[in-house]
Image (cartoon, grey):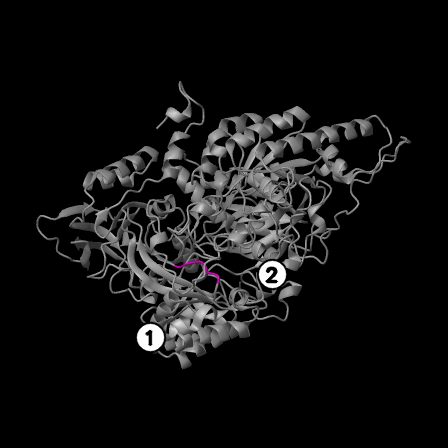
Amino acid sequence: MGPCLRRGTALTGLGGALVAALALAAPVTAQDIAITNARLVIGDGSAPIDGGTVVVRGGKVVAAGAGVAVPAGIERVDAEGRYVTPGIVAAFSRVGLTEVDAVSGTNDRSAPRTRFSAGLDIAPALNPMGSPVAVNRASGVTRAIVAPGGSSNLFAGQGAVVDLADDMDMVTKPRALQFVAFGEAGSAKAGGSRAATFLLFREQLLAARSYARNPAALAEWGNDAMLQRADAEALVRVIDGTTPLFVRVDRAADIVNVLKLKGEFPAMKLVLVGATDGWLVAREIAAAKVPVLVSPLSDLPDSFERLAATQSNAGRLKAAGVDVSVGVFDDDDAHKMGYATQYAGNLVGLARVPGASGMTWDQAFASISSAPARAVGMDGSIGSLRPGRAGDVVIWDNDPLELGSRPTAIWIDGKAQSLTTRQDRLRDRYATPQEGALPKAYDR
Amino acid sequence: MKNGMKGSLLAAVSLALVGCAATGGSAASAGDKPAASAEKPAKFDKNPYPSTYAPYAGRPTAVRGVTIFDGEGGRIDNGVVLFAGGKVEAVGGADTAVPAGYDVIDGTGKVLTPGIIDIHSHLGDYPSPSVDAHDDGNEATSPTTPEVWSEHSVWPQDPGFSRALANGGVTSLQILPGSANLMGGRSITLKNVPSRTVQGMKFPDAPYGLKMACGENPKRVYGGKGRMPSTRMGNFAVNRQTWAKAAVYKKKMDEGKAVDRDLAMETLAGVLAGEILIHNHCYRADEMALVIDMSKEFGYKVSTFHHAVESYKIADMLAKEGICSAMWADWWGFKMEAYDSVNENVPLVHNAGACAIVHSDDANQIQRLNQEAAKALKAGRRMGIDVSDAVAWRWLSYNPAKALGIAEQTGSLKAGKMADVVLWNGNPFSAYTRPEKVWIDGALMFDAMDPKRRPVSDFELGQPGEGDVK
């Protein structure tokens, strides 16, 4: 990897393709590697360590920090002082579920005409060969929390935690979350009002609880059943806390009411998604110890449930003690996961604006790595370079939170990854637009 | 797209995607007075909704010790900019004399630029909150509606204007009809100042534009209604037939013959006369090439292709034709005609000698067009297209000003031009930088250091978060 990396750091159009070719040529098995001389970011909110080393063996991080000894015989990569970080974890996304949004055959986000809801499981819909996987990977994203968009009913179904590696095995953890929207979107599903949403939510969970106690009773529910068997089974796992429940909610009053649901279902693990007006009830969220995934630059009152939208939401929640992750949604949530670094960088910038709240660089980076891993209950296995975590490592050409910075090398589970995308191929073909002796179609 | 929901809501891919169009009409046309001579057929008033904008009060101001990007590619380190009476007075080095009585601002460590001009916005026509009652951007009842004017839909209380000002440093912007229609209607160029009326925002003497749209949107919207066009060839047929009719109308007018007033034909005749600028939503390279031929067939010129996701494939042709491309840095994949996006589109177009513009088409991204330009700039540098920061600022101010026909008045920091100025608290191509002060015609309209210099729309008054930093 040494020569490969050096070419990568001088990434030009052709150089990038070369790096990719070399990476592709490498065996797709986990490598034992030590990346030395790094500006090392652990991803847990600690400060970068200059001169740091990270050692990956058997696909996992075994050591990271200053003064880490490099085991004898292990492949060494000199990062030449550049940033080395854990891969970005997309906090809330649809990567792998769609290729071209408006081409319905490629778009598996939502299933508005299915008779199922909570029981839907996105895992078999994921396409690791899709170009969005490669494009997001090339921007430094190595893992993603993927949620379904919606069903015909209140619950959208079960999402997964995935990796963005260049192989066919995309699912890190299936059924890693259940997704439901409250607020205006929930009302539209539940029959037209928030009252209907909360009642439907409660009745479906109670039905699932009945099913758990007496599965045979399901047959008696008949065609008017509130739930299909698969839905009931999925909701049982929500009630007992096995599956975290990701709840899209924005209006402050809705947030407070969602937090109260834990009163009746105390084992349920809630994660708030959006929480655009969350800063108005930051203390309540912090007290409930419920993590929040925000799309941090949403600052428009684009609906009546987001009247208090501000880019300071994330910083104010953080200051109140809420565990905040930064995601890229309310935007393109399938193709542009790389915006996570830009959004996190903006939070650093906000900290310099009088009256605004942002984050420190260290906090902002953690909000796109270890924090989303923690929200989905997986910070023991992904999201940072602490020992025991997956060997998801990125070397960057510059400060990763700065605009336009790009990875020069990526490993996922210790396997070197291709950085070349279909977009790069198009760029190279048209680096000079004029056709040559033969048409462009022969230029590859 | 409107309101940034495009990714999560497929709905965004239907009508919202139809957001973009063209703008521009010629400034001169708008200001023409009814003919004074006794020509027989009465000339129709070309400017019946005139601008009432007048610059707000400013103070003579000097910013010194500052890095200046002048908007035309020039850069001065440790420079001085003077403005007074709404106009830029001087742009120079550290030795530039500051007259007595000027407010002096220390710009050390900061960057001063012309205000950003967004050539593609739907603020006001698709305002926040994006409720059905505000859905005023597409007159999607006929594939050709050149008779509608976007200014008649603009809601001046859209909170998005203030976000574009305070977070984005946007001082002028073009509001376009959506792209449901082949000919979506006239656009309008605004000064980004709060106002009770849209007339109070209209950029004085800016030309009108006509928004046109290629490709998927018109054929989907009308094909879906079982009417023409339902194909790309249908798109062209309807366009050509409409231009042919407009040519007849214009000929009658030119010959002094009496015509029944036809608002649609009036707009198209204005285009054929070169008074109204064409802003053409078009993604695919092959379609742009066909549009260029259509424009020659009927004798008009395209000012700018908007979105222009494939401009990099024909950047040489666009340079030769003198047509601008208004582009995103990296949007892709939301529909088929946006599939071949590359992150280097903007620098590749620039590098071919064509006019490159970074646009938003979005109430969120209009707040960080500088950041979008930065991503494109760095993508270009990685492939060896070495554009300096100062030259890249052309994508954000001077090039859009030219494409809108307002470059004589604004878009760069030159003596005598409008003092539309942003002081950034660092390099504006950094994620860590924000506008600190924004002046429009020399009036301080936003100051991050002064909560009273932060506009609050009527809609936000008395609501949670009123006057917040946003």
SS under mark 1: loop
Amino acid type at mark 2: Pro
**Where does label 2 land, which residue?**
B129
Disc 2: CA contacts within 10 A as few (<14), some (14-19) or many (>=20)? many
Q: Position of residue B85 (x, y in %)?
A: 68, 49
Q: Tell whether position B289 is magenta.
A: no
Dominant secondary structure (helix, strand or loop) of the stretch shown in magenta: loop
Q: Position of residue B227 (x, y in %)?
A: 65, 40
**Disc 2: which chain?**
B
Amino acid type at mark 1: Asp
Q: Residue at x 49, y 73 (%)?
A: A200
Name the side, left or right, on which A178 lies relative to B243. left
B246 versus A194 height, above or below = above
Q: Over which residues does the magenta segment extend?
A: A147-152
Q: Position of residue B327 (x, y in %)?
A: 52, 41
Look at the image and tell me whether residue B390 can be seen. Answer: no
Q: Tell whether position A150 is magenta.
A: yes
Q: Nearer the viewer, residue A45 or A48?
A: A45
Let me know if marks 2 and 1 both belong to one chain: no
Which residue is situated farthest in the top direction here? A437
A321 versus B119 height, above or below = below
Disc 1: CA contacts within 10 A as few (<14), some (14-19) or many (>=20)? some
Name the side, left or right, on which A268 lies relative to B348. left
Q: On the image, which quarter does residue B242 sit in?
A: top right
**Where does label 1 land, which residue?**
A240
SS under mark 2: loop
